[in-house]
Amino acid sequence: MAVIRKQHGHFLDDFRPGQLFRHKRGKTITEGLFAVFTDFSMTTNPLSKNARYARAYGFRDMVVPPGLVMAVVFSQSVEDVSENARANLEYIDMRFGVPVYLGDTLEAETTVLSVRASTRDPTLGVVHVQTTGRNQDGQVVLTFQRKVQVWKRDPEATVADGEVPPREIPVSLGLPAYEPSRPYRELAHLSSPDTYLEDFRPGDVLEHSRGRVVTTDHILLTGMLDNTSQVHSNQWMIDQQPERYVGGQLIVFGGIPFNLCLGLSSADVADNALADLRYATGRHTAPVFAGDTVFASTEIRALRDLPGRPDLGVLDTVLRGHKFGPKGAAAEKVDIFYLERELVVKRRSHYA
């Protein structure tokens, strides 16, 4: 008999530019997963709360919020890409496709775009990848790039430095057609009255009043997503080498503050959005730990037309998250999240 120590995940020296990972398992969006994440993140858009409302707008069922779509697709990539990562560095060109509904099954694949060894730390480097999620019909629900800082297995190992261009992934945002015969105006009382496209002005900054504390339940939430990154769940591992890990303690999976910032902004920005269109770039600017309370604000950058849809427009924003940390006897605001976010928002002229 042999004792075999199994190892999951890849290290920096395992990656090769152009490498394709077709991730295992996939995940079906169950009612439990949908309810827990929608309610936890304080999402208020009735498309994700009220089946009657969603169907009246032409959707098949309640619509899975964009933050949950992102968290499910992202988490499928973790075992192959970032289970042995130190930190997730940046999201790039995150584009949403067809709506995701209760009962849909999402599967994902990832292409390695580049591998770079650190010039300062021989134990680390950066992997740049492109991940795409599809539903059970093969339709793209989300595609994005990200950069992640990954540990080397062997500090002396040679790294396959290099890069390949991103794949061309056609993405089409799926929205029901506008039909004047639908009872839009009869349902207008179910969403915030001041979140139509006409209500926003470039230059305004909306400070969202609600906050949400992150408890040790973040470990359960991360497990519900099948995210296997050990820095979010393996306290024993961190205790052995606390200096090796950010903060020397379990770090909250970035998809959780990502979802919280989207949810906290929902009542003031996204209550009358039909979809999120694109996130040009995003990053976690400081870690979140159990006990931190997350807050958010939204800067309005621009408003523009959505081609072919006079009933809708695109709202360009910057979503920022922050927490408060001790600074002597006082408290200090600490920025934790930055996201350039484009939403498709209803015009009051057509819906209210």
Image (tube, rainbow, N blue to C red):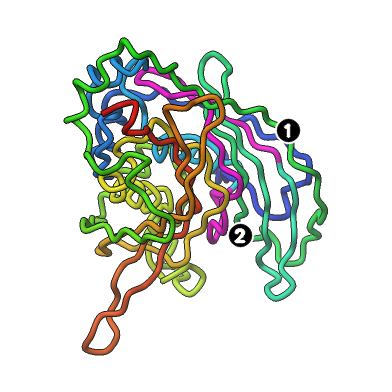
Residue found 56% across the figure and 59% down from its top: 89
Given residues 191 and 104, the one toward you in this image is 191
Q: Which residues are magenta?
A: 82-111
| Residue 276 shows up from this direction | yes
Q: Quadrant of residue 20?
A: top right
Residue 93 on the magenta segment: yes
| Residue 233 shows up from this direction | no
Image height check: is 246 above or below 216?
below
- How far apart marks 1 and 2 lie (CA) works out to 24 Å
Please tell me the numbered disc located at residue 33: none
Spot the residue most to the bottom. 328
Image location of residue 337, percent across then percent down: 43, 60
Image height check: is 165 above or below 73?
below
Image location of residue 251, percent across then percent down: 40, 60
Residue found 21% across the figure and 56% down from its top: 210
Given residues 216 and 200, the one toward you in this image is 200
Left/right of residue 267 with respect to residue 320 in the rendered view: left
Spot the residue most to the left. 189
Residue found 22% across the figure and 39% down from its top: 193
Residue 171 on the magenta segment: no
Image location of residue 225, percent across then percent down: 40, 37
Q: Residues within 10 Å of mark 2 (few under 14, many from 20)?
A: many
Residue carrying label 2: 149
Q: Amino acid at mark 2?
A: Gln
Given residues 203 and 45, the one toward you in this image is 203
User: Which one is earlier in the sequence, the residue at label 1 or at label 2?
Assistant: 2
Please tell me the numbered disc located at residue 168: 1
